[in-house]
């Protein structure tokens, strides 16, 4: 019994909070852009069955065996992101330009013409998977205020149990307050005569998703090509939100708190992939590729 009490107290001391991802995070990190070399980007990433490209190695590492000579290459990207927003008949367009290295790689090929396995290759490549940089600005005038949303959600709830990310912030900044000293009845800081309020919501996103790959491949009589890759995927994402309402009779400038005004996410994961490519005797023969990245299966065929 004494040991059980010690174990229980020890678990209490080392306990910690666990925060999970939501569906927005899953969609953000699962949808990748067809970035890489200029050749791969021009074909929207359809290069897994062809090979011989510094970016296609990340799709199917067997494509590394297509190389017959050494190669060093890089690709640059100049990107302009334009977002147009519409809010209560008010539109705003925000452009953001960005310049970065999209792909960088080195391939070393070892030839053995007198053997069935006539070629082996090693590749070290860097590839941008996604660029998160963009700005959103939403602005306009309306008779509504986010304070009314805080007020409606707080009614019949004690101020001790308010949502700490929404209504409690509004309560602590006196955007809403208890009515006649009651703990679960609230009133708004707005007056009934206030209208035509100016709203401004600014969302700044920045960051990237990159992969560094180490690949090995071999060619068997230039008919069967196999490859293996270890990929180190890194994520760096930042999001900042700022919300302002103007035009109040009691205060010319009021900043309304929003939940999670800043989000920062970083991560590093290890990915492994293996694949094969085979082709007919003729140069125009069918080339098919199979890959098994991250426990899933993928197939790609091209002529």
Image: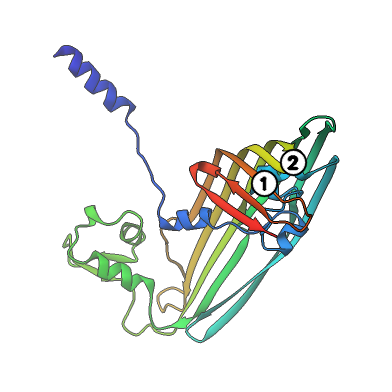
Mark 2 sits on what residue? 65
Residue projecting furthest to the top = 2
In screen coordinates, is 131 left or right of 163?
right
Q: Where is residue 79 in the image (x, y as percent from the top left)?
A: 72, 63
The image shows residue 76, relative to residue 125, as above or below, that is below
For label 2, count other residues whose C-alpha is less than 10 Å away and answer few (under 14), some (14-19) or many (20+).
many
User: Mark 2 or 1 closer to N-term?
Assistant: 2
In screen coordinates, is 269 left or right of 12?
right
The C terminus appears in which quarter of the rendering?
bottom right
Indicate which label's residue lies in the foreground, 2 or 1: 1
In screen coordinates, is 111 left or right of 269?
right
The image shows residue 136, relative to residue 33, as above or below, that is below
Mark 1 sits on what residue? 277
The N terminus appears in which quarter of the rendering?
top left
Q: Where is residue 80 in the image (x, y as percent from the top left)?
A: 70, 67
Distance from the alpha carbon under mark 2 to that under mark 1: 9 Å
For label 1, count other residues whose C-alpha is less than 10 Å away and answer few (under 14), some (14-19) or many (20+).
many
Seen at 26% across and 57% down, the residue is 162
Quarter where residue 194 is shown: bottom left
In-front residue for pair 138/120: 120
Q: Where is residue 198 in the image (x, y as percent from the top left)?
A: 48, 79
Q: Position of residue 256 (x, y in %)?
A: 43, 65
Secondary element at image label 2: helix
In screen coordinates, is 75 left or right of 134?
right
């Amino acid at each position: 019994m004494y040991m059980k009490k010690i174990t229980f107290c020890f678990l209490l001391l080392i306990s910690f909070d666990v925060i999970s991802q939501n569906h927005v995070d899953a969609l953000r990190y699962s949808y990748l852009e067809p970035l890489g070399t200029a050749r791969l980007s021009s074909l929207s990433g359809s290069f897994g069955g062809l090979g011989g490209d510094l970016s296609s190695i990340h799709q199917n590492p067997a494509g590394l065996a297509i190389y017959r000579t050494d190669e060093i290459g890089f690709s640059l990207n100049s990107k302009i992101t334009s977002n147009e927003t519409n809010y209560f008949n008010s539109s705003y367009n925000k452009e953001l330009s960005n310049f970065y290295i999209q792909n960088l790689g080195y391939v070393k090929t070892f030839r053995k013409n007198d053997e069935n396995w006539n070629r082996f290759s090693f590749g070290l490549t860097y590839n941008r998977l996604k660029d998160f940089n963009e700005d959103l600005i939403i602005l306009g005038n309306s008779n509504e205020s986010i304070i009314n949303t805080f007020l409606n959600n707080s009614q019949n709830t004690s101020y001790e149990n308010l949502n700490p990310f929404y209504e409690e912030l509004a309560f602590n900044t006196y955007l809403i307050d208890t009515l006649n000293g009651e703990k679960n009845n609230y009133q708004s800081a707005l007056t009934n005569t206030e209208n035509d309020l100016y709203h401004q919501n600014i969302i700044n996103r920045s960051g990237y998703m990159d992969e560094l790959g180490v690949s090995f491949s071999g060619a068997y009589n230039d008919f069967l090509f196999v490859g293996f890759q270890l990929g180190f995927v890194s994520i760096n994402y930042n999001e900042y939100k700022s919300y302002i309402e103007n035009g109040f009779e009691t205060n010319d400038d009021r900043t309304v708190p929003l939940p999670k005004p800043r989000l920062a996410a970083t991560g590093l994961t290890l990915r492994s992939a293996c694949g094969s490519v085979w082709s007919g005797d003729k140069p125009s023969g069918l080339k098919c590729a199979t890959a098994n990245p991250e426990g899933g299966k993928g197939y790609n065929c091209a002529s």
